[in-house]
Amino acid sequence: MKKILVPVDGSQASEKAAMKAIEIARDYNSEITYLSVADVRGKYAYMGDGVVSVPINHSQISAMLVENQTKMLDAFASIVDSKGINIEKKVAAGVPYEEILKYAADNKADLIVMSRRGFTKFKRFFVGSVTQRVISDAPCPVLVINEDEEK
């Protein structure tokens, strides 16, 4: 197991996943890629009457979202102790689960270590789950690290 992919959203749950990935990387002499995805879907302005207008400078908004994700990823990488492990940081723009799956396939990841936020089953049904979609279609094994359930 040489390549571990860790999707990062800046949450405590993704920090827990990164810590587990680091533990595995140390055991197997693996490299880790932290991947953060700027979700650039649906960045539209709404008129006062509820009618959707055309996108407002979509490329500028997308660039700003990517820049913000890059800053978050840099801050994230600085707080986890990954001494002695080859770490790579990547930022993609698109639909999160699609970009995670694409990166894993294109880069031949051996393992994806990711978090699942602690939503109740009821809330998860309505919110949807990036993790669930990655598990369903991943080209490699996925290790899911759970965060404590919301109260």
Image: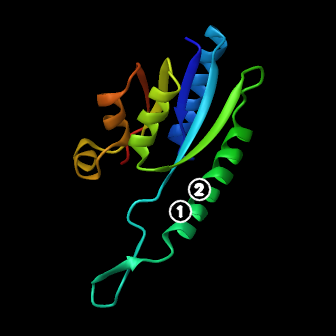
Check residue 81 in the rendering and tell me which mark sits there, or answer none. none
Residue ID for mark 1: 62
Q: Secondary structure at mark 2?
A: helix
Mark 1 and 2 residues: CB-CB less than 8 Å, in contact?
Answer: yes
Q: In the image, is 29 to the left or to the right of 65?
A: right
Q: Residue at x 70, y 46 (%)?
A: 74
Q: In which quarter of the view is residue 90 placed?
A: top right
Query: Is 77 or 33 nearer to us in this picture?
Result: 33
Q: In which quarter of the view is residue 147 placed?
A: top left
Q: Residue at x 58, y 31 (%)?
A: 18
Residue ID for mark 2: 66
Q: In the image, is 50 to the left or to the right of 142?
A: left
Amino acid type, label 1: Ser
Q: Residue at x 27, y 84 (%)?
A: 50
The x and y percentages for residue 73 are 64, 46
Q: Residue at x 48, y 20 (%)?
A: 111
Q: Is residue 117 visible?
A: no
The x and y percentages for residue 46 are 36, 81
In the rendered image, the quadrant that contains the N terminus is top right
The x and y percentages for residue 84 are 77, 20
Q: Residues within 10 Å of mark 1 (few under 14, many from 20)?
A: some
Q: How many angstroms separate mark 1 from mark 2 (CA)?
A: 6 Å
Q: Secondary structure at mark 1?
A: helix
Amino acid type, label 2: Val
Q: Is residue 63 above or below residue 36?
A: below
Q: Is residue 33 above or below residue 23?
A: below
Q: Is residue 124 above or below residue 54?
A: above
Q: Residues within 10 Å of mark 2 (few under 14, many from 20)?
A: many
